[in-house]
Amino acid sequence: MEYNHKEIEQRARRYWEENDVYRVEIDKSRPKYYVLDMFPYPSGAGLHVGHPLGYIASDIYARYKRLNGFNVLHPMGFDAYGLPAEQYAIQTGQHPEITTRQNIERYCEQLRKIGFSFDWSRTVRTCDPAYYKWTQWAFLRMFDSWYDRSAGRARALSDLIAHFGAHGSEGIDAAQTKQLNFTAEQWKTMDAAARNEVLMNYRLAYLANAIVNWCPKLGTVLANDEVCEGLSVRGGYPVEQKKMWQWCLRVSAYAGRLLDGLDNLQWSDSLKETQRNWIGRSQGAEMRFAVDGRSDLSLEIFTTRPDTIFGVTFMVLAPESKYVQQITTTDRRTAVDEYLDSIRNRTERERMIDRRVTGVFTGAYAVNPVSGAKIPVWVSDYVLAGYGTGAIMAVPAHDSRDYAFARHFDLPVIPLIEGADVSESSYDAKEGTMINSCGGGLDLNGMSVADALAEAKRFIEARGLGKVKTNYRLRDAIFSRQRYWGEPIPVCYVDGIPTAYDRLPLELPEIDKYLPTENGEPPLGRAKDWNTPEGYPLELNTMPGFAGSSAYYLRYMDPHNDEALVSESADEYWRQVDLYVGGAEHATGHLIYSRFWNKFLYDIGAVCEDEPFRKLVNQGMIQGRSSFVYRIKDTNTFVTAEKRDAYDTTPIHVDVNMVSNDILDLPAFKTWRPEFADAEFILGDDGRYTCGWAVEKMSKSMYNVVNPDDMVERYGADTLRLYEMFLGPVEQSKPWDTNGIDGVFRFIRKFWNLYYKADELLVDDSEPSAETLKSLHKLIKKVTADIEAFSFNTSVAAFMICVNELAAAKCRSRQVLEPLAVLIAPFAPHLAELLWHDALGHDYTVCDAPWPAFDEKYLVESTITLPVSFNGKTRYNITVAADASREDVQAAALADPAAEKWLDGKAVKKVIVVPGRIVNIVV
RNA sequence: GCCCGAAUGGUGGAAUGGUAGACACGAGGGACUUAAAAUCCCUUGGCCAUAGCGGCUGUGCGGGUUCGAGUCCCGCUUCGGGCACCA
């Protein structure tokens, strides 16, 4: 029969589904391998051809591993909570559950057609109560935990409470919101409210009055990674800083481990680097500066450059710093208040765009703890309240920000490094020899910066002026959202005290509308009887989008377990994700939160691996390739791209589905829109209308969306899969261009036609020739190496070459087809499955076949051809015996008739023979 | 500003320091066909030569290392990505 992709693929699919081929269970007799894709958010638009790129790559890898004897876990699910479904619900009143379910069905249908080897019995959706029960459970465990920094792990809150009862806060080194000091006696006399306040300071999930990113347009707060340049990532609405009571996760407690853990992961360097930047470790010192004339007060600062202590010419406080009110002198009060007001009225976005130097003198002076110099204390918004201590020592000579401030307010600049020119700008480099750095018992003069840094730290600690400290930029994650479509936070308020509500799942209630209430309460404020059975009010905020996606990979291991997130046996078998495929845009969101979440679960003994994703591959984005027609201004005439320069034209997007190889389908265009019905055209010399094109984001408004269903309909899933891989390296972003798909389609048909003719099967039992075996084994070698290296585009090319060779040799040997079918099974599973059954007569799935063994002996040649170059430039080839010695090769190269011409009477200086590579003759 | 990454034909892209441009698209030419589709064959980086053999040049720019550099090193340019008053 002719290659009929619809029939072939349907038959293969039916076979897989009827035989449950992709179901996977724990099997201790086989090694496991866990291949995971980042699960999609099911949007209303459905999948476009960009989405399956990563899924196809991971599916190839999963199938390859399975063919190599691994027990492969390869699941798929849906990240179902999120803003678009809720926005849609607000507009239409339709329950987000319904639209979400519809979207998921559509996604499933689309995915089903592409032939993935997912075990659908393990699917999860984050909005199922049976699933989010475990999201809520993890939250409560965080609520009941604190981070013991001396032990380097999370511990149960009960340990901490016991310690407080016995020793107070003495001897506790915890990750905390602020340093607390109290005795056991004080603890014992505290009432429930006071104790709650103390414990909130330590809990890993805690309620705090924090400065948050508030987005009025979305009506919710956002995490740092959901904000970019002062605008919400979703929607692009302005975000303001606001102080609000919010649930937070103490992610910062894990900053050090999150950073160090990166070293052992097989992730791309760029992604690791992005996470390192985001976590932002800086090592330095915290120091106290006394306030002149105020024995009751000292200012604590953080600096990474304690070596520049002699260059401090002023100090700066963040506007929000509590010190500001305490030290401002009476005569400066009005000026300071005015400044604070002006700052308060600027939004975050205005501050970012307009980076003027602003600030005000407080009237107070601080004392340099080493040199004893008196220095003025200023307030400026270039110092951030949320980092370090919210106060800095300013060293204008060696910090560009301090320098700008000093120049603007005419404050002194003292250079500390020999030869540093600070007349125009600061000298920020950590190189050079120290000068002007002696006093108070410390002498850094003559030292290198690195030595001075070490010496200054030693001195500061020895004299008790401060202590060495590591700070991280990573902030705690705000965990409250003022939205409906998310997991309820399982907390109730008993006499105003937040208390765990542990009858899980706490199901999302029905409400009449999805907007916040009139009095500003989140939408859950509309739910009737949103109380515990005892009548205590439940939390009205819901969890953020990243909550449900932080541990979903664990749930796939044991998706129907109602007793635990994952059973110990399932966790011990599947352990962690071996290969994770997804977009790099999750670098500072999901991939940080998941790692944090997993490390916490590891600390409490719920999982046995510290890191969730061992190897990670970032697939590139598929961009759209938009097509344009050119309308001549004020007419209804369209001019072809190559002639448009002669006219004054307006480019108009046209649907790429009406364009083939940049040639516009004119009848389709005329019926596309009423206004184009009587369009006229100026065609090219070939009588066709050629469209222009540009690479843009794939989106409906650009009319450049290519739907995988259409591709499957026209070419079949196998062709789509091969073509997506053929397009280029998986990691690389590239525009989708349907133009090349015909080549892959041709290849598939050629492959098919080699073994089928009309209704006849052409497979025979002939002995394959040495040539075809060579061709086959070259392919085995290449494809195996390529899949291991996650490089699929060159594999597809290798298949094309091999099949061309087989077709030319008319080789239809079973001995060749059998390994060939297995080799191509990861790429074109439908085709492979049918060949396996029909042409080869097997009664089991190709998925259970063994990966073909590569044998070097088929590639061994008796003679080899070597290029001979003169001074590196190749001139001619020689053929020698494969086992010829260097001397023989050299002799053969010089004996060749062509040698004379290139030697041209010159003497041979040197001959380099690289066995199997090249002969280079230097003359 | 800081930190990554990239740059190769008309296009997508191949090349463990060893014959640059595999494979595919597109284009041009040809075969088959009443015709179309499908299929097959040839050419296809540039320049020169061409009856035929062939020659020169060429991987963003400038240097360097090497017998030999798209690949390694130094200095630029451009484009993408991340972080960004983080002291």
Image: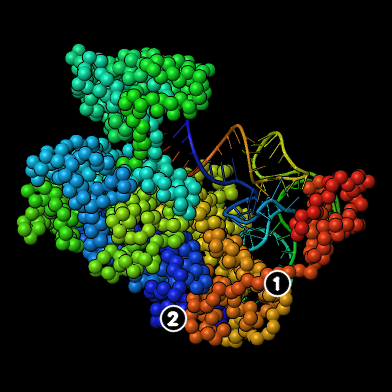
In the rendered image, is residue A299 in sight? yes
Q: State the CA–CA distance, disc 2 to disc 1.
A: 37 Å
Image x and y of residue A327, in percent: 22, 20
A123 vs A676, left or right, is left
Residue under disc 2 on the same chain as residue under disc 1: yes
Residue at (43% x, 49% y) in the render: A262
Residue at (53% x, 85% y) in the render: A842
Q: Nearer the viewer, residue A900 or A688?
A: A900
Q: Nearer the viewer, residue A213 or A93?
A: A213
Farthest residue to the right: give it: A905
Quadrant of res A411: top left
Q: Which mark is residue A384?
A: none
Image x and y of residue A912, in percent: 80, 51
Q: How many marks?
A: 2
Q: Which comes sooner in the sequence, label 2 or label 1?
A: 2
Q: Amino acid at mark 2?
A: Tyr
Q: Badge 2, how many Cα within 10 Å: few under 14, some, many 20+?
A: some
**Element type at mark 2:** helix
The residue that disc 1 covers is: A857
Q: Nearer the viewer, residue A571 or B54?
A: A571
In the rendered image, is residue A247 in sight? no
User: Which quarter of the figure is the C terminus of chain A placed in?
Assistant: top right
Q: Badge 1, how many Cα within 10 Å: few under 14, some, many 20+?
A: few
Chain under callout 1: A
